[in-house]
Image (tube, rainbow, N blue to C red):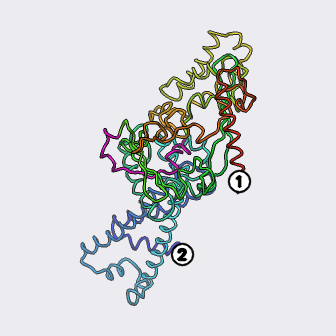
Amino acid sequence: MFKKYIDFIRGVSVNKLGLAGVVLTTSAFVTFVILELTRILGFITNAYVGLVNYLLFPALFIIGLIMIPIAWKKRKKQTGKSTGQLLQEQFEKRETEGSLLGSRIFRTIAIFTLINILFLSVLSSRMLHFMDEPHFCGTACHDVMNPEWVTYQASPHARVKCVECHVGEGVDALVNAKLNGLWQIISLTFNLYEKPIPTPVHQLRPARETCEKCHWPDKFYGQRIKTIVNYRLDSLSTPQYTTLSLKIDAGEGEIRKGIHWHIAEENQIRYTSVNDEREEMIWVDVRQPDDSFKRYRNSELVEEHEGEFENIRTLDCVDCHNRATHIYENPEKALNERIRKGLIDRSIPFIKKAGLGAILPIYSDTASAREQVVNRLLGYYQREYPEILRQNFAEIDSAITVLQNIYIRNIHPYMNIRWNSYPSHIGHRGSAGCFRCHNQNMIDEGGESISHDCTMCHSIAAYGGNTPYQYLEPVDTSDQDYIIHQYLKNEFLESAIEMQGDQEQ
């Protein structure tokens, strides 16, 4: 069999161009198979090797195949001989006996053609599979995608493939994604991309095709208790508690409407925003029971932007959950979370204050960031509290590692990503969030504004209090804020009772 292959190779190599095509095709095939075996066996995991194996070698294989018929055509032109005559010249007589279609050489060519088609089919399938892997998405374009790759791995969606949200299902989605990917390759090659990458990403698939495969509105019901812990900047890093009962219902029939009412199937909210950035709303439309729309206009913007309504968007999941996966943390919130989890020892005096002082500055690169976090934290304690440093050196050294990891996860100098470069619209801390629409400036024709009552979306059991359920404790009438205390306590209890009634329905 091998001898037959060698004879065939010699036969199709009618000139130097044909020989080059044969060598190129054969070497590309052999190299691809070897590298693919090493990848399957786990000896090589680097995404760049996969990129070369699935893009470069297949291209060389196809170029080599194309060179062979070009060489034959060139040879025919030089000699003036027909294809049959050249075949008889290049191959043994027994290979070309009989009619052209019935000859052994024709069968050999047909077999190799089928092998090539099969190889290219398998190759295409493997290439698409490889390019769908998160590791490829995150590491192939390392400098550009590294921030997204780092945050993705630490996100709630770390086990969801990138393509499930960024591409979606179906041939149309795949074709659109690949066409968009061509421009991204050009941008990467010629350094045309913006730093940081601008958001929102307008090429994302609709949320109803992606997010709602797992998180459909009917899935959310009732209320969910959430306690947020903030640590003061005092010597004890004293905890303050904010406890909210989030009303997450989509609302249906007589059931109270909650946060996910905005995306319930029977409701529709549409809006337009300044520069289509989804930050400052020009107007918001809410569909009414009779299918008409009630419009709330931003009294501070509508005259300035009158007529700029070409980008009208229907509100969906990502208008609020805009950082569902690639979550860049607020520095204070990140530090609070590490202290709460016990990764940083709260017993170290002034650790919250000193830690913030170490991570808030922007350093030139990762290496200098690691060094400066060490210098700033140790320097603070050496200057101010040398005795604390001596007594808690091991704990402070452990805190340094955690602080470095916080910084490296969230700050990426190459892409100009700094603190709050990508704010989250969930809630309204660190960005306008809910208040983009729920504010006194969004007014309908009758002069009524969209409600921005705090208890519409959540009941409040504590707000910066010393205990997690501050407002559920007995009311002290001597306290100057006792009226607010009484109101929030009553609202919390009434909301809980109504929720119980809704569930019984």
Give the residue type that dot 2 points to: Met
Q: Does the magenta stretch include residue 220?
A: no
**SS type, badge 1:** helix
Vertical relation: 323 (above or below) 69 = above
Q: Which of 347 and 67 is in front in this view?
A: 347
In the image, residue 327 lies at what x, y percent? 55, 40
State the image quarter where residue 473 is shown: top right
Q: Is residue 197 visible?
A: no
Q: Is residue 343 left or right of residue 259?
A: right
Q: On residue 1, which mark appears?
A: 2
Q: Which residue is drawn at 55% across and 33% down?
A: 429
Q: In this view, does 301 lie to the left or right of 386?
A: left
| The N terminus lies in quadrant | bottom right
In the image, residue 322 lies at what x, y percent? 51, 44
Q: Give the range drawn in magenta.
A: 302-326
| The C terminus lies in quadrant | bottom right
Q: Nearer the viewer, residue 280 or 334?
A: 280
Q: Nearer the viewer, residue 229 or 133?
A: 229
- N-term-proximal mark, 2 vs 1: 2
Give the residue type that dot 1 points to: Gln
In the image, residue 2 lies at what x, y percent? 53, 72
**SS type, badge 2:** loop
Q: Nearer the viewer, residue 143 or 430?
A: 430
Q: Mark 1 points at which residue?
A: 503
Give the overall secondary structure of the magenta segment.
loop
In the image, residue 245 lies at what x, y percent? 66, 40
Residue that lies at the very extreme toward the front in this rendered image: 446
